[in-house]
Structure formats: C-alpha cells, structure tokens
Image (tube, coloured by chain):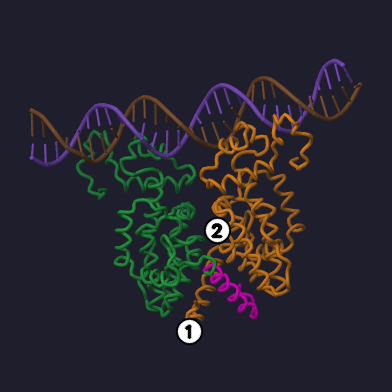
Chain colours: A green, B orange, C brown, D purple
Amino acid sequence: MDTGLETLSDQNAGTRRTTLSRDRVLRAAIAYADANGIESLSMRGLANELEVVPMALYKHVANKEDLLDGMVEIVVSEIDQAAATGEWKHDVRLRILAARACLLRHSWSRAVLESRSAMTPAMLSYLDALTGLFLAGGLSVDLTHQMMHALGNRMWGFSQELFAATPPKDTETLRAQKAALPAHYPNLAEIAKAAMHSDPASGRAPGCDDQAEFEFALDLLLDGVDRLRTRQPTR
Amino acid sequence: MDTGLETLSDQNAGTRRTTLSRDRVLRAAIAYADANGIESLSMRGLANELEVVPMALYKHVANKEDLLDGMVEIVVSEIDQAAATGEWKHDVRLRILAARACLLRHSWSRAVLESRSAMTPAMLSYLDALTGLFLAGGLSVDLTHQMMHALGNRMWGFSQELFAATPPKDTETLRAQKAALPAHYPNLAEIAKAAMHSDPASGRAPGCDDQAEFEFALDLLLDGVDRLRTRQPTR
DNA sequence: AGAAGGGGTGTACGCCGTACACCTAGGCAC
DNA sequence: GTGCCTAGGTGTACGGCGTACACCCCTTCT
C-alpha cells in the first residue's frame, strides 16, 4: 500500500485530481502545519485543503495520532545523513546539526516529536547511526549509552527517556519487531543489551537509570564550563 | 483578589462547600492532571470534580490557557530553593536537581511548561537565582549567558530560547513590567543587557544567537565525553 | 456478467472551549 | 430597613473537533 504508483487518473475533465494516498495526505499536512501552525491543523481543515470530505482521510491514516506520527516520520527521514569521515567528533557534530536544521525547518516538529510515545523506523535509524559513530570512535558501550541520553535532549529536546511509556498494546507484532530489532539497528541493540545486564527492569528501555543519566549530562556541562571559566570569555 | 481569606461560608447545612477561588481551581486542576493525565483535563471535567458548573471556573481563570499557566506557576514555585553554600558548582547542581525533582512529581508539567510562550514570575525568579549563582561563582557574563541557554534544556527540556515568540500584545503593561524587570531580576537583566550590546535585534531575548548557543552546549558535551573516553567507563 | 473490494461520501454522535444572559446572596449607603 | 451594587454560581447555546458507521460507486479480476 501507499506506493506512489498513481494509476490512471486525471481524465481531461479533471473531475478527480490525482486521488489521495497516505503520502499525499502526510505531505499536505506538513505543508499545512508549516503554513498555519500545528495547533490549527485539523482533520477537517486538512481534508478541506485536499478538496475532499473529512472521512476520506481515514482511508489513508488510522486517526489523527497516526497522521502526526507519519508527519514526524517524514521530517526525521529528511535529516541529512552525511557520510562518515572517520573523525568521530566531527561526524557526530554534523549529524546532530543536520537534525537540528531539519527540525527547525518545520517549527512544529519538535513539539510533535516530543508528544509521540513510540519510536519510528526513521528515528531508530538515525539514532542507530549516531550510536555507531560513537562506538567507532572508541567510546565504550556504557559511555556511548550515556552520551546518547545526554544528546537526546540536544537533538530534539527530549528530556524523558527515548523509549519510555510504551503501553503493552499488540503483543504479537510487538514481540516480532522487537526480535527483529538487532538486525536493523545493531548499534542500538548492543547498548540495549549491555544496559539490560546491569538492571533487567520490565518493559522497554530497561536498565536505564534516568536520574544517573541526567546527572551525567549535567556534570558534563558544569565541568566543561568550569574549565572554560579560567580562560577568557568565548564570544 | 484570590487571597485565601475564605469569608464566612460552610454554614452547617453544607449547601455550598468553601466556595471557589483561583487557587482552589488551580490546585484541583493539578491534582486532576496528576491523577488522570493532562490530556484528559478539561474545563468540564474539572468543574465536575469541583461539583460546580463548567462556566463557574471562568470567574477565576480567564480560559484554559490561563488555567495551564497558573498550574505551571504553582509547580515552578514549589521548586526547592536551597540556600547557597558558596560552592557555586554544587549549588547550581542542587538547584537544577531540585527543579527536575519538582517537575518529575507532576509528569505533565514538562510538556505544559514547554507549550507556554511567556515567562511567569516564578520561572523568572528561579532563573534569576541560578544566573546569580554562576555570576557569583566567577563566570563571565557571556559565559553565564551561554550556560543558561545550555542548561535550559537540561532543566526542563527547552530547546528553543526561553523568551522566544512573545507576541506584541498589550504594549502598555508590557512596557511597564519590562521596565520593572531589572529591579526584580537583576541577574537576568545583566546578561540581557550584555547580550543587547552585541546584537540589538527586535523583540525580547534580543542578541541571542540560537545556533551559536546550541553549538556551545553541544561542544561542551562532546569535548567532555572525549576527555572521558581515554579513561575507563564510568558505571 | 457478476463478485469483490478499495476509496470517496453523508450523516450523526459526543466531546470540547466558551460567549452571553441570567439569577442570587451578601455588603454597603442612606 | 430599603434599595442598590457587585462578586460569583447557573443555564443555554454555538461552533468546532475527532471519528464511528452505513453507504455507494468505480475499478479490477474471474
């Protein structure tokens, strides 16, 4: 479904324009949110924009939550994944600035991203690549883990853990995709496995000590500025 | 208005319980959000909780936005402002962890806080005190400024500038409270003044270079972890 | 030709925030 | 005491929202 094949439409009378598709709906929603702000994006308004009746949208998105999920998925997938140069710090820096630039292009995206509970493939892919850069740069698995949490904030404003608060929901497919996770996101799988050892808590994102991770990042900043304190001001 | 004086009520018949007040409404809303989640807090449900008709709330809060403003104001004002010991890094650490602890007590508060556009007195007061700690600790005005932005994120998940996007609105009172700002929040006023010099842009929070501030914090983290990289893992 | 089903439609329900007119009870001036 | 004023609770109503459900039409496959 929702491949962009666009089978025979636009007969010259122009009665029905190009038909809908999940992708067309999502992109129209993004354009609408860009133009009018996310708070004024409604199913009815979007349908109106697409010159279609509101309920037509529900043939392509499950509900408004799904619409928002799809919107951020597209935005995140547009993050420029620059090629690695081998200079890990430089590479990480580039990736994160690319993410920031991408989210800034759609000012609503940060807020929506934070309101989502589950990770999408594009997010996982981005995070996995970033994790890989740290590991390749020689950071230990634990340090990489801590750093990912510390940066989560910076990248798109998260403060809570990335995998938090996913309700049980459909256990069947969930278990399946959980099993498939290591294959697609090997780096994430590695730090998750390591974290699991120290504290096999329930649910996803097990073994993450939020408080410790928060303090780690805080101390990194405080110690860093303390070191700068003795020199002249930066700007 | 809304002082807690509670003039003669509760006549033994118990017809009208204690009457409403802005404070009672706000605290009931906080309790409701704590118990049921912020997304299910509605004016109607809250009114029902207070055994009152929905429109009665509007005698005490202007609208739902105002209700949310009032809720975060209370939460933020409950942040434990520990006495300064003179050890600036320790003091800053404690204040920030106190803020985190307070916001974590009300899981909805972070999201609501981020959705607000304007600063409230309690927020300004907290930020002013923190700024004061940095300055007293010997950080330059510029470094303090950068650090406040870097920490904004850590404290309650902000990624955007703190003062951003306040619409023009009521110029009369706005100008007045803007003029009164230095008296109440001297430390904030100092870094704002310094920032104004380098780039007198329009609106509030002038002279803040978002991109530079983001990169400052990012580099602090990356350089910090790079330094840790050469030693053994932390946990 | 006839079945199947993907995709747009129309109607309707229950929730939301809140404008506006109203009523009522206490405090005050006289 | 009488009459007014006002703060605060009430009732009704409106427009907007997300979306369930029954429909129907048009394409495609057999």
Count the marks: 2
Residue B169 in percent (x, y) is at 64, 44
Residue wearing tag 2: B160
Residue wearing tag 1: B230
Q: Earlier in the sequence, mark 2 or mark 1?
A: 2
Tell me if B232 is positioned left or right of B187 in this view: left
Give yes or no for residue A221 being in the magenta stretch: yes
Residue B154 in percent (x, y) is at 56, 64
Nearest the eye: D3 or A9: D3
Nearest the eye: B228 or B177: B228
Residue B218 in percent (x, y) is at 51, 70
Residue A97 in percent (x, y) is at 46, 66
- Give the spatial CA distance, label 2 vs label 1: 33 Å
Write down the chain letter for disc 1.
B
Residue A189 image-quadrant placement: bottom left
Give yes or no for residue A179 being in the magenta stretch: no
The reply to whether the C-beta atoms of the residues labelled 2 and 1 are less than 8 Å apart is no
Residue B15 image-quadrant placement: top right
**Span highlighted in magenta in the image:** A213-235
- Give amino acid for label 1: Thr
Write down the chain letter for disc 2.
B
- Give amino acid for label 2: Gln
Residue at 59% over, 50% down: B117
- Badge 1: how crowded within 10 Å, few (<14), some, or many (20+)? few
Nearest the eye: B147 or B100: B100
Q: Tell me the chief SS of the magenta region.
A: helix
